[in-house]
């Protein structure tokens, strides 16, 4: 009797719970991953081979049960469609994504410890997540860790990296901390960086930079026109 392969008997994401309905107790858990996503949508606008999930269950077969997901605050997978079959994902089941696991996972530590430094670290290592970032700006002293820690999977075990921003060649992005201003409010956030360590701008910053460039160009043209008039030359005749 021929037995079917296990992956064909696994449930679909339509059949699996899409959330554990656990509310976050830290606004950074929502804001930071969304900021990273919005920047990605700008710098990778013409690419369709990536997906960034936020507070979404990752179902896999390397844990205690394929029905028990791990739910990071944010994760990035490469080599998958941004919208699977043109639709939004309810969750991320590795067996429905051609066994592609996330390259990058982000956990933001909150007031209630969430096993970021032990249990989840073991889960992501076993799953095969290449880069694991733990961001802990408020409770790092409590947890006896650093505010920003990045781990790379080497021979099946995570090794902490010390450079920041840290360049991830397999992802094509760097990651590190930076300042974010919204109105009169300033806060520390995480940004993507390029290979040279320069951070990518938000869409608003890009628009502001373009406006400033246009204004500088207009000012230059006005000064040039004024100089030509001083020389008795009509700038409109040139």
Image (cartoon, helix red, strand yellow):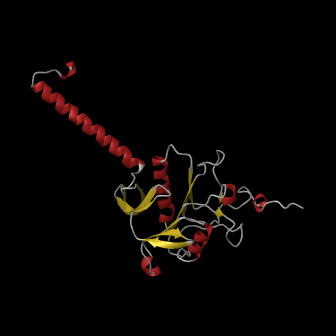
Q: Residue furthest right?
A: 1
The answer to which quarter of the image holds residue 76 is bottom right
Viewer-nearest residue: 171 or 60:
171
Left or right of 47: which side holds 230? left
Image coords of residue 60 (percent x, y): 67, 64
Answer above or below: position of 123 versus 74: below
Left or right of 78: which side holds 59? right
Left or right of 1: which side holds 36? left
Which quarter of the rendered picture does the C terminus lie within? top left
Q: How many marks?
A: 0
Answer above or below: position of 33 versus 236: below
Image coords of residue 7 (percent x, y): 75, 60
* Residue appearing at x 37%, y 61% in the figure: 178
* Residue appearing at x 50%, y 43% in the figure: 46
Q: Residue furthest front?
A: 155
Viewer-nearest residue: 166 or 40:
166
* Residue appearing at x 49%, y 48% in the figure: 41
Image coords of residue 31 (percent x, y): 48, 60
Image coords of residue 139 (percent x, y): 45, 76
Which quarter of the rendered picture does the N terminus lie within? bottom right
């Amino acid at each position: 009797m021929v037995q079917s392969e296990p992956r064909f008997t696994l449930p679909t994401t339509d059949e699996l719970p899409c959330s554990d309905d656990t509310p976050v107790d830290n606004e950074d858990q929502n804001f930071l991953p969304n900021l990273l996503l919005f920047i990605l949508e700008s710098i990778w606008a013409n690419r369709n081979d990536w997906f960034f999930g936020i507070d979404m269950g990752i179902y896999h077969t390397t844990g205690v049960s394929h029905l028990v997901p791990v739910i990071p605050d944010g994760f990035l997978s490469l080599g998958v469609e941004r919208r699977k079959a043109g639709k939004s994902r309810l969750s991320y089941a590795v067996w429905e994504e051609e066994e592609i696991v996330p390259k990058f996972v982000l956990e933001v530590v909150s007031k209630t410890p969430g096993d970021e430094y032990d249990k989840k670290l073991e889960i992501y290592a076993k799953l095969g997540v290449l880069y694991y970032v733990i961001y802990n700006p408020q409770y790092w002293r409590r947890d006896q860790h650093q505010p920003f820690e990045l781990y790379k999977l080497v021979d099946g075990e995570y090794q902490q990296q010390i450079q920041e921003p840290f360049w991830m060649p397999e992802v094509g992005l760097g990651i590190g901390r930076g300042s974010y201003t919204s109105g009169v409010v300033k806060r520390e956030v995480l940004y993507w960086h390029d290979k040279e360590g320069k951070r990518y701008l938000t869409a608003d910053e890009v628009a502001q930079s373009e406006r400033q460039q246009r204004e500088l160009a207009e000012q230059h043209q006005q000064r040039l026109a004024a100089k030509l008039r001083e020389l008795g030359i009509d700038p409109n005749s040139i």
